[in-house]
Image (cartoon, helix red, strand yellow):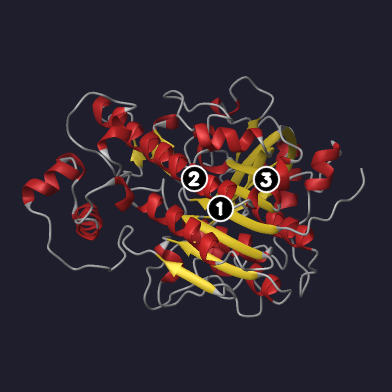
Amino acid sequence: MERKQYPVNIILVVFDSLRRDCVAAYGSPPWGKVRTPHFDRFAAESLMMMRAFPESLPTLPTRRALYTGRRVYPFHNGDFRLKGDFVGAPGWGPIPEEQATLAEMLAREGYRTGLIADVYHMFKPSKNFWRGFDQWLFLRGQENDPQRSGPRLSREELDHWLPTEMQNEHTVRFIQHCMTNMRDRTKEEDYFAPRVLVEAARWLEQNADAEKFFLVVESFDPHEPWLVPPHYRKMYLAQDGPEQVKSGYADTSDMDEYLLARTRANYSGAVTMCDRWFGHFMETMRVMGLLEDTMVILTADHGHSIGDANYIGKRGYPSARAVYDVPLMIRFPGAEHAGSRSDMLAQHHDVTAEILRAAGVEPETPIDGKPFVEAALAGRPGPRDHATVAWGSTVTVIDESWWLNCKVDGTGVLLHDLGADDPFAANVAEGNAEEVKRLFALAEADAAGGFPEWLLEIARKHKDAPGCSDLAARA
Protein backbone atom coordinates (compact mmCIF):
# COMPACT_ATOMS: atom_id res chain seq x y z
CA MET A 1 0.00 0.00 0.00
CA GLU A 2 1.38 3.40 -0.95
CA ARG A 3 2.16 5.56 2.06
CA LYS A 4 -0.03 8.66 2.18
CA GLN A 5 0.98 11.75 4.11
CA TYR A 6 -1.92 13.90 5.20
CA PRO A 7 -1.21 17.65 5.46
CA VAL A 8 -4.08 17.80 7.92
CA ASN A 9 -5.56 19.44 10.91
CA ILE A 10 -5.77 16.93 13.75
CA ILE A 11 -8.42 16.60 16.46
CA LEU A 12 -8.26 14.17 19.37
CA VAL A 13 -11.52 13.65 21.29
CA VAL A 14 -11.37 11.70 24.57
CA PHE A 15 -14.43 10.71 26.60
CA ASP A 16 -13.74 9.56 30.15
CA SER A 17 -15.25 6.20 31.19
CA LEU A 18 -16.93 5.55 27.83
CA ARG A 19 -17.44 1.79 27.56
CA ARG A 20 -16.71 0.45 24.11
CA ASP A 21 -19.83 -1.70 24.11
CA CYS A 22 -21.95 1.38 24.84
CA VAL A 23 -21.06 2.78 21.43
CA ALA A 24 -23.71 0.98 19.38
CA ALA A 25 -21.38 0.53 16.40
CA TYR A 26 -19.30 -1.74 18.65
CA GLY A 27 -22.19 -3.68 20.23
CA SER A 28 -24.34 -3.53 23.36
CA PRO A 29 -23.73 -3.77 27.12
CA PRO A 30 -25.43 -6.52 29.15
CA TRP A 31 -28.44 -4.29 29.91
CA GLY A 32 -29.27 -3.46 26.29
CA LYS A 33 -28.38 -1.17 23.42
CA VAL A 34 -27.35 2.43 24.08
CA ARG A 35 -28.47 5.02 21.53
CA THR A 36 -25.46 6.67 19.90
CA PRO A 37 -26.48 7.75 16.37
CA HIS A 38 -23.72 10.35 16.01
CA PHE A 39 -20.96 8.04 17.25
CA ASP A 40 -22.33 5.39 14.88
CA ARG A 41 -22.27 7.75 11.91
CA PHE A 42 -18.71 8.70 12.82
CA ALA A 43 -17.81 5.00 13.02
CA ALA A 44 -19.26 4.39 9.55
CA GLU A 45 -16.97 7.09 8.18
CA SER A 46 -13.88 5.89 10.06
CA LEU A 47 -11.33 3.18 10.60
CA MET A 48 -12.59 1.27 13.64
CA MET A 49 -9.99 -0.43 15.80
CA MET A 50 -11.64 -3.47 17.36
CA ARG A 51 -8.92 -4.39 19.88
CA ALA A 52 -7.75 -1.13 21.42
CA PHE A 53 -6.52 -0.83 25.01
CA PRO A 54 -5.03 1.77 27.34
CA GLU A 55 -1.36 1.73 28.29
CA SER A 56 -1.75 2.56 31.99
CA LEU A 57 -4.76 3.36 34.14
CA PRO A 58 -6.65 5.19 35.51
CA THR A 59 -7.30 8.84 34.50
CA LEU A 60 -3.94 10.59 34.72
CA PRO A 61 -1.57 7.74 33.81
CA THR A 62 -3.74 7.15 30.75
CA ARG A 63 -3.33 10.73 29.62
CA ARG A 64 0.39 10.75 30.29
CA ALA A 65 0.81 7.91 27.79
CA LEU A 66 -1.62 9.46 25.32
CA TYR A 67 -0.05 12.92 25.46
CA THR A 68 3.58 11.76 25.24
CA GLY A 69 3.66 8.40 23.45
CA ARG A 70 5.80 7.13 26.30
CA ARG A 71 5.08 4.19 28.55
CA VAL A 72 4.08 5.01 32.11
CA TYR A 73 4.31 1.35 33.23
CA PRO A 74 5.88 0.25 35.54
CA PHE A 75 5.64 3.67 37.23
CA HIS A 76 9.30 4.47 37.79
CA ASN A 77 9.38 7.71 39.81
CA GLY A 78 5.61 7.35 40.00
CA ASP A 79 5.06 7.26 43.76
CA PHE A 80 3.50 10.72 43.87
CA ARG A 81 2.45 12.53 47.04
CA LEU A 82 1.86 16.04 45.79
CA LYS A 83 0.23 19.00 47.48
CA GLY A 84 -3.11 19.94 46.00
CA ASP A 85 -4.11 16.36 45.22
CA PHE A 86 -4.94 13.06 46.88
CA VAL A 87 -2.54 10.14 46.70
CA GLY A 88 -3.99 8.45 43.65
CA ALA A 89 -2.91 5.30 41.89
CA PRO A 90 0.77 4.81 41.00
CA GLY A 91 1.68 7.17 38.18
CA TRP A 92 -0.98 9.67 39.29
CA GLY A 93 1.11 12.76 38.73
CA PRO A 94 2.23 15.36 36.20
CA ILE A 95 3.88 14.70 32.86
CA PRO A 96 7.64 14.42 33.49
CA GLU A 97 9.43 17.61 32.51
CA GLU A 98 11.91 15.76 30.32
CA GLN A 99 9.14 14.23 28.20
CA ALA A 100 7.89 16.33 25.27
CA THR A 101 4.14 16.45 24.75
CA LEU A 102 2.22 16.15 21.51
CA ALA A 103 1.17 19.78 21.82
CA GLU A 104 4.77 20.94 22.22
CA MET A 105 6.06 18.88 19.31
CA LEU A 106 3.27 19.94 16.95
CA ALA A 107 3.41 23.62 18.00
CA ARG A 108 7.09 23.71 17.07
CA GLU A 109 6.14 22.55 13.59
CA GLY A 110 3.66 25.37 13.06
CA TYR A 111 0.46 23.85 14.43
CA ARG A 112 -1.86 26.04 16.44
CA THR A 113 -2.75 23.99 19.50
CA GLY A 114 -5.80 23.99 21.74
CA LEU A 115 -7.13 22.04 24.72
CA ILE A 116 -10.78 22.18 25.84
CA ALA A 117 -11.42 20.06 28.93
CA ASP A 118 -13.40 19.57 32.12
CA VAL A 119 -11.19 16.75 33.48
CA TYR A 120 -10.35 18.60 36.67
CA HIS A 121 -7.59 16.17 37.72
CA MET A 122 -5.49 17.53 34.84
CA PHE A 123 -5.66 21.06 36.23
CA LYS A 124 -4.92 20.55 39.92
CA PRO A 125 -2.11 22.71 41.36
CA SER A 126 0.54 20.01 40.92
CA LYS A 127 -0.35 19.09 37.31
CA ASN A 128 0.87 20.30 33.90
CA PHE A 129 -1.25 18.58 31.26
CA TRP A 130 -1.88 21.88 29.46
CA ARG A 131 1.82 22.21 28.58
CA GLY A 132 2.39 23.21 24.96
CA PHE A 133 -1.12 24.41 24.13
CA ASP A 134 -1.54 27.87 22.64
CA GLN A 135 -4.92 27.98 24.37
CA TRP A 136 -6.22 25.78 27.14
CA LEU A 137 -9.69 26.15 28.58
CA PHE A 138 -10.63 24.43 31.84
CA LEU A 139 -14.38 24.14 32.37
CA ARG A 140 -14.79 23.84 36.10
CA GLY A 141 -17.13 22.01 38.44
CA GLN A 142 -16.76 18.28 37.92
CA GLU A 143 -16.79 16.04 40.99
CA ASN A 144 -14.74 17.50 43.85
CA ASP A 145 -13.32 20.43 41.95
CA PRO A 146 -13.31 23.22 44.59
CA GLN A 147 -15.29 25.56 42.39
CA ARG A 148 -17.85 26.38 45.08
CA SER A 149 -18.09 25.98 48.82
CA GLY A 150 -21.82 26.56 49.26
CA PRO A 151 -24.68 26.49 49.71
CA ARG A 152 -24.66 22.92 50.96
CA LEU A 153 -27.37 20.37 50.27
CA SER A 154 -30.21 20.02 52.70
CA ARG A 155 -30.91 16.61 54.21
CA GLU A 156 -33.86 16.21 51.85
CA GLU A 157 -31.70 17.03 48.83
CA LEU A 158 -28.95 14.70 49.97
CA ASP A 159 -31.38 11.81 50.44
CA HIS A 160 -32.70 12.45 46.91
CA TRP A 161 -29.30 12.28 45.23
CA LEU A 162 -27.73 9.52 47.32
CA PRO A 163 -29.62 6.41 48.52
CA THR A 164 -29.49 6.20 52.30
CA GLU A 165 -27.95 2.72 52.16
CA MET A 166 -24.99 4.17 50.21
CA GLN A 167 -24.39 7.08 52.56
CA ASN A 168 -21.14 7.28 54.48
CA GLU A 169 -18.66 10.06 55.21
CA HIS A 170 -16.93 9.74 51.83
CA THR A 171 -20.01 9.38 49.62
CA VAL A 172 -21.87 12.19 51.37
CA ARG A 173 -18.92 14.54 50.94
CA PHE A 174 -18.65 13.56 47.28
CA ILE A 175 -22.31 14.17 46.44
CA GLN A 176 -22.38 17.37 48.49
CA HIS A 177 -19.54 18.80 46.43
CA CYS A 178 -20.84 17.58 43.08
CA MET A 179 -24.28 19.03 43.56
CA THR A 180 -23.04 22.27 45.12
CA ASN A 181 -20.98 22.86 41.99
CA MET A 182 -23.99 22.25 39.74
CA ARG A 183 -26.77 24.16 41.52
CA ASP A 184 -27.33 26.71 38.73
CA ARG A 185 -28.19 24.33 35.90
CA THR A 186 -31.41 25.33 34.19
CA LYS A 187 -31.05 23.74 30.73
CA GLU A 188 -29.23 20.93 28.97
CA GLU A 189 -26.51 23.24 27.69
CA ASP A 190 -25.47 23.82 31.33
CA TYR A 191 -24.37 20.20 31.72
CA PHE A 192 -20.71 19.36 31.31
CA ALA A 193 -20.51 17.40 28.04
CA PRO A 194 -22.56 20.01 26.17
CA ARG A 195 -20.36 22.79 27.57
CA VAL A 196 -17.15 21.04 26.54
CA LEU A 197 -18.28 20.27 23.01
CA VAL A 198 -19.85 23.69 22.46
CA GLU A 199 -16.62 25.35 23.57
CA ALA A 200 -14.63 23.00 21.31
CA ALA A 201 -16.84 24.03 18.38
CA ARG A 202 -16.34 27.68 19.33
CA TRP A 203 -12.56 27.14 19.33
CA LEU A 204 -12.82 25.96 15.72
CA GLU A 205 -14.71 29.13 14.80
CA GLN A 206 -12.28 31.42 16.62
CA ASN A 207 -9.25 29.75 15.06
CA ALA A 208 -10.47 29.49 11.49
CA ASP A 209 -7.45 31.56 10.40
CA ALA A 210 -4.97 28.88 11.54
CA GLU A 211 -2.91 27.37 8.75
CA LYS A 212 -3.10 24.02 10.55
CA PHE A 213 -4.19 23.09 14.04
CA PHE A 214 -4.15 20.39 16.70
CA LEU A 215 -7.14 20.38 19.06
CA VAL A 216 -7.65 18.09 22.05
CA VAL A 217 -11.20 17.79 23.42
CA GLU A 218 -11.46 16.11 26.83
CA SER A 219 -14.93 15.34 28.19
CA PHE A 220 -15.06 13.93 31.72
CA ASP A 221 -18.55 12.64 30.94
CA PRO A 222 -19.77 9.90 30.96
CA HIS A 223 -17.68 9.50 34.12
CA GLU A 224 -19.64 9.43 37.34
CA PRO A 225 -21.56 11.13 38.85
CA TRP A 226 -24.07 10.26 36.14
CA LEU A 227 -26.01 13.49 36.20
CA VAL A 228 -28.20 13.97 33.14
CA PRO A 229 -31.39 15.86 32.26
CA PRO A 230 -34.34 13.57 33.08
CA HIS A 231 -35.26 13.06 29.42
CA TYR A 232 -32.02 11.14 28.85
CA ARG A 233 -32.57 8.80 31.78
CA LYS A 234 -36.19 8.23 30.71
CA MET A 235 -34.97 6.95 27.35
CA TYR A 236 -33.75 3.89 29.28
CA LEU A 237 -35.91 3.76 32.41
CA ALA A 238 -39.35 5.35 32.52
CA GLN A 239 -40.03 4.26 36.09
CA ASP A 240 -39.62 7.03 38.63
CA GLY A 241 -38.08 6.56 42.03
CA PRO A 242 -34.98 7.27 44.11
CA GLU A 243 -31.96 8.67 42.30
CA GLN A 244 -28.63 6.82 41.97
CA VAL A 245 -25.73 8.59 40.25
CA LYS A 246 -22.62 7.27 42.02
CA SER A 247 -20.49 4.18 41.68
CA GLY A 248 -20.27 2.14 44.85
CA TYR A 249 -17.02 0.34 43.89
CA ALA A 250 -18.50 -2.75 45.43
CA ASP A 251 -20.28 -6.04 44.86
CA THR A 252 -23.73 -5.58 43.33
CA SER A 253 -25.15 -9.02 44.01
CA ASP A 254 -27.24 -7.60 46.86
CA MET A 255 -27.86 -4.19 45.26
CA ASP A 256 -31.50 -3.20 44.96
CA GLU A 257 -32.67 -4.18 41.48
CA TYR A 258 -34.27 -0.81 40.83
CA LEU A 259 -31.15 1.12 41.91
CA LEU A 260 -28.96 -0.93 39.59
CA ALA A 261 -31.39 -0.31 36.72
CA ARG A 262 -31.43 3.39 37.60
CA THR A 263 -27.63 3.50 37.59
CA ARG A 264 -27.45 1.87 34.18
CA ALA A 265 -30.13 4.21 32.82
CA ASN A 266 -28.26 7.27 34.08
CA TYR A 267 -24.98 6.02 32.61
CA SER A 268 -26.65 5.18 29.30
CA GLY A 269 -28.28 8.60 29.31
CA ALA A 270 -24.91 10.24 29.92
CA VAL A 271 -23.45 8.38 26.92
CA THR A 272 -26.37 9.46 24.73
CA MET A 273 -25.95 13.07 25.88
CA CYS A 274 -22.24 12.90 24.97
CA ASP A 275 -23.23 11.47 21.60
CA ARG A 276 -25.72 14.26 20.91
CA TRP A 277 -23.22 17.04 21.57
CA PHE A 278 -20.44 15.25 19.72
CA GLY A 279 -22.89 15.46 16.82
CA HIS A 280 -23.04 19.23 17.36
CA PHE A 281 -19.26 19.40 17.21
CA MET A 282 -19.09 17.33 14.02
CA GLU A 283 -21.85 19.41 12.43
CA THR A 284 -19.83 22.55 13.16
CA MET A 285 -16.92 20.94 11.34
CA ARG A 286 -19.15 20.15 8.37
CA VAL A 287 -20.52 23.69 8.16
CA MET A 288 -17.00 25.12 8.36
CA GLY A 289 -15.73 22.80 5.63
CA LEU A 290 -13.24 21.12 7.98
CA LEU A 291 -14.23 17.53 7.30
CA GLU A 292 -12.21 17.49 4.08
CA ASP A 293 -8.85 18.40 5.60
CA THR A 294 -9.05 17.22 9.22
CA MET A 295 -8.23 13.90 10.85
CA VAL A 296 -10.49 13.24 13.86
CA ILE A 297 -9.64 10.55 16.43
CA LEU A 298 -12.21 9.47 19.01
CA THR A 299 -11.31 7.30 21.99
CA ALA A 300 -11.81 6.85 25.75
CA ASP A 301 -9.42 6.39 28.65
CA HIS A 302 -11.29 3.33 29.98
CA GLY A 303 -14.78 2.01 30.67
CA HIS A 304 -16.73 1.26 33.85
CA SER A 305 -18.34 -1.89 35.22
CA ILE A 306 -22.00 -1.42 36.15
CA GLY A 307 -23.11 -4.76 37.49
CA ASP A 308 -20.85 -6.75 35.16
CA ALA A 309 -19.75 -9.87 37.09
CA ASN A 310 -21.61 -8.41 40.10
CA TYR A 311 -19.33 -5.39 40.40
CA ILE A 312 -19.78 -1.64 40.02
CA GLY A 313 -16.72 0.52 39.53
CA LYS A 314 -13.40 0.28 37.74
CA ARG A 315 -10.33 -1.60 38.85
CA GLY A 316 -7.21 -3.23 37.56
CA TYR A 317 -7.57 -6.52 39.42
CA PRO A 318 -9.37 -8.52 38.34
CA SER A 319 -9.28 -6.68 35.02
CA ALA A 320 -12.19 -7.04 32.62
CA ARG A 321 -13.38 -5.96 29.20
CA ALA A 322 -15.97 -3.52 30.58
CA VAL A 323 -13.08 -1.33 31.77
CA TYR A 324 -10.14 -2.26 29.51
CA ASP A 325 -11.76 -2.33 26.06
CA VAL A 326 -11.81 1.20 24.64
CA PRO A 327 -13.35 2.58 21.46
CA LEU A 328 -10.80 3.90 18.97
CA MET A 329 -12.01 5.36 15.69
CA ILE A 330 -10.09 7.46 13.17
CA ARG A 331 -11.90 9.53 10.57
CA PHE A 332 -9.57 10.58 7.79
CA PRO A 333 -10.03 13.72 5.67
CA GLY A 334 -12.96 13.33 3.33
CA ALA A 335 -13.97 10.13 5.15
CA GLU A 336 -11.35 8.21 3.18
CA HIS A 337 -11.26 4.54 4.22
CA ALA A 338 -14.81 4.79 5.55
CA GLY A 339 -16.08 1.50 6.93
CA SER A 340 -12.62 0.01 7.55
CA ARG A 341 -12.07 -2.24 10.55
CA SER A 342 -8.99 -3.80 12.07
CA ASP A 343 -8.53 -6.49 14.71
CA MET A 344 -4.88 -5.63 15.36
CA LEU A 345 -3.81 -4.67 18.86
CA ALA A 346 -3.36 -0.94 19.47
CA GLN A 347 -2.79 1.11 22.61
CA HIS A 348 -3.04 4.74 23.61
CA HIS A 349 0.65 5.51 23.14
CA ASP A 350 0.32 4.18 19.60
CA VAL A 351 -2.26 6.91 18.95
CA THR A 352 0.44 9.45 19.80
CA ALA A 353 2.83 7.87 17.33
CA GLU A 354 0.14 7.84 14.64
CA ILE A 355 -0.65 11.53 15.16
CA LEU A 356 3.02 12.42 14.76
CA ARG A 357 3.28 10.28 11.63
CA ALA A 358 0.21 11.88 10.09
CA ALA A 359 1.63 15.33 10.84
CA GLY A 360 5.04 14.43 9.43
CA VAL A 361 6.68 15.28 12.75
CA GLU A 362 9.55 13.30 14.23
CA PRO A 363 9.42 12.88 18.02
CA GLU A 364 12.06 14.92 19.83
CA THR A 365 13.22 11.85 21.73
CA PRO A 366 12.35 8.18 21.14
CA ILE A 367 8.82 7.19 22.13
CA ASP A 368 7.31 3.81 22.88
CA GLY A 369 4.21 4.14 20.72
CA LYS A 370 4.15 2.58 17.26
CA PRO A 371 2.26 3.87 14.20
CA PHE A 372 -0.36 1.34 13.14
CA VAL A 373 -2.75 2.85 10.59
CA GLU A 374 -0.95 1.84 7.40
CA ALA A 375 -0.81 -1.79 8.49
CA ALA A 376 -4.42 -1.69 9.69
CA LEU A 377 -5.68 -0.36 6.35
CA ALA A 378 -3.59 -2.84 4.41
CA GLY A 379 -4.75 -5.79 6.50
CA ARG A 380 -1.19 -6.57 7.56
CA PRO A 381 -0.15 -7.72 11.04
CA GLY A 382 0.24 -4.82 13.42
CA PRO A 383 3.35 -3.72 15.26
CA ARG A 384 2.26 -5.45 18.49
CA ASP A 385 1.77 -9.14 19.23
CA HIS A 386 0.56 -8.31 22.74
CA ALA A 387 -0.67 -5.40 24.85
CA THR A 388 0.58 -4.73 28.36
CA VAL A 389 -1.82 -2.60 30.42
CA ALA A 390 -0.88 -1.41 33.90
CA TRP A 391 -2.98 -0.39 36.84
CA GLY A 392 -1.19 0.17 40.12
CA SER A 393 0.58 -2.93 41.37
CA THR A 394 -1.11 -5.19 38.82
CA VAL A 395 -0.60 -5.80 35.14
CA THR A 396 -2.70 -7.25 32.34
CA VAL A 397 -1.15 -8.88 29.28
CA ILE A 398 -3.38 -9.56 26.27
CA ASP A 399 -2.49 -11.40 23.07
CA GLU A 400 -4.48 -13.19 20.39
CA SER A 401 -5.38 -16.10 22.66
CA TRP A 402 -4.99 -15.14 26.30
CA TRP A 403 -5.77 -12.50 28.93
CA LEU A 404 -3.35 -12.60 31.87
CA ASN A 405 -3.96 -10.50 34.97
CA CYS A 406 -1.68 -10.68 38.00
CA LYS A 407 0.30 -8.67 40.50
CA VAL A 408 3.70 -7.32 39.45
CA ASP A 409 5.45 -9.82 41.74
CA GLY A 410 3.96 -12.62 39.62
CA THR A 411 1.44 -13.80 42.22
CA GLY A 412 -2.34 -13.79 42.25
CA VAL A 413 -2.58 -15.05 38.70
CA LEU A 414 -5.79 -14.92 36.67
CA LEU A 415 -5.64 -16.40 33.16
CA HIS A 416 -8.54 -16.36 30.71
CA ASP A 417 -8.81 -18.24 27.44
CA LEU A 418 -10.07 -15.74 24.86
CA GLY A 419 -11.14 -18.61 22.62
CA ALA A 420 -13.68 -19.84 25.16
CA ASP A 421 -17.39 -19.07 24.81
CA ASP A 422 -17.24 -17.08 28.04
CA PRO A 423 -13.55 -16.31 28.58
CA PHE A 424 -13.94 -14.67 31.98
CA ALA A 425 -16.11 -17.38 33.49
CA ALA A 426 -13.08 -19.43 34.54
CA ASN A 427 -9.50 -18.92 35.68
CA VAL A 428 -7.46 -21.49 33.76
CA ALA A 429 -4.02 -20.56 35.14
CA GLU A 430 -3.28 -23.84 36.90
CA GLY A 431 -3.71 -25.88 33.74
CA ASN A 432 -1.63 -23.53 31.59
CA ALA A 433 1.51 -22.83 33.60
CA GLU A 434 3.73 -22.40 30.52
CA GLU A 435 1.42 -19.80 29.02
CA VAL A 436 1.40 -17.93 32.32
CA LYS A 437 5.21 -17.92 32.39
CA ARG A 438 5.40 -16.74 28.78
CA LEU A 439 2.90 -13.92 29.25
CA PHE A 440 4.41 -12.76 32.54
CA ALA A 441 7.82 -12.69 30.85
CA LEU A 442 6.33 -10.23 28.35
CA ALA A 443 5.14 -8.06 31.26
CA GLU A 444 8.63 -8.15 32.75
CA ALA A 445 10.23 -7.26 29.41
CA ASP A 446 7.88 -4.30 28.97
CA ALA A 447 8.76 -3.08 32.47
CA ALA A 448 11.96 -1.46 31.27
CA GLY A 449 14.33 -1.23 34.21
CA GLY A 450 12.32 -3.71 36.26
CA PHE A 451 9.68 -3.10 38.89
CA PRO A 452 10.35 -0.42 41.53
CA GLU A 453 10.59 -1.82 45.03
CA TRP A 454 7.79 0.40 46.36
CA LEU A 455 5.44 -1.05 43.71
CA LEU A 456 6.43 -4.60 44.61
CA GLU A 457 5.69 -3.79 48.25
CA ILE A 458 2.18 -2.66 47.29
CA ALA A 459 1.74 -5.92 45.37
CA ARG A 460 2.77 -7.95 48.41
CA LYS A 461 0.13 -6.19 50.51
CA HIS A 462 -2.55 -6.37 47.81
CA LYS A 463 -5.18 -9.00 48.50
CA ASP A 464 -5.44 -11.71 45.88
CA ALA A 465 -8.57 -11.69 43.78
CA PRO A 466 -11.07 -14.53 44.35
CA GLY A 467 -10.23 -17.69 42.46
CA CYS A 468 -6.64 -16.85 41.58
CA SER A 469 -3.65 -19.13 41.85
CA ASP A 470 -0.38 -18.01 43.45
CA LEU A 471 1.47 -21.01 42.10
CA ALA A 472 1.03 -20.75 38.36
CA ALA A 473 3.36 -17.82 37.69
CA ARG A 474 6.25 -19.50 39.54
CA ALA A 475 5.68 -23.02 38.20
Earlier residue among tags 1 and 2: 1
Q: Quadrant of residue 344?
A: top right
Q: How many numbered circles are shown?
A: 3
The image position of residue 253, as x and y in percent, is 33, 29
Which amino acid type is marked by label 3?
Ile
Q: Residues within 10 Å of mark 1 (few under 14, many from 20)?
A: some
Which amino acid type is marked by label 2?
Phe
| Image-based side of 159 in relation to 340, left or right | left
Secondary structure under the numbered disc 3 in the rendered image: strand
Q: Quadrant of residue 398?
A: top right
Instruction: Mark yes or no: residue 354 visible.
Output: yes
Q: What residue sits 51% from the left and 45% below the top? A: 317
The image position of residue 132, as x and y in percent, is 60, 75
The residue singled out by tag 3 in the image is 330
Mark 1–mark 2 contact, CB under 8 Å? Answer: yes
| Image-based side of 139 in relation to 28, left or right | left
Instruction: Tell which residue pokes out farthest to the top in this image.
Output: 421
Secondary structure under the numbered disc 2 in the rendered image: helix
Q: Residues within 10 Å of mark 2 (few under 14, many from 20)?
A: many
Cα–Cα span, label 1 and label 3: 10 Å
Earlier residue among tags 2 and 3: 2
What quarter of the picture does the N terminus occupy? top right
Decide: is 257 above or below 341.
above
Earlier residue among tags 1 and 3: 1
The residue singled out by tag 1 in the image is 13
Decide: is 307 above or below 130.
above
Q: What residue sits 67% from the left and 45% below the top? A: 330
Secondary structure under the numbered disc 1 in the rendered image: strand
The image position of residue 449, as x and y in percent, is 72, 68
The residue singled out by tag 2 in the image is 278
Which amino acid type is marked by label 1?
Val
- Tell me, for residue 305, which label it has, or none: none
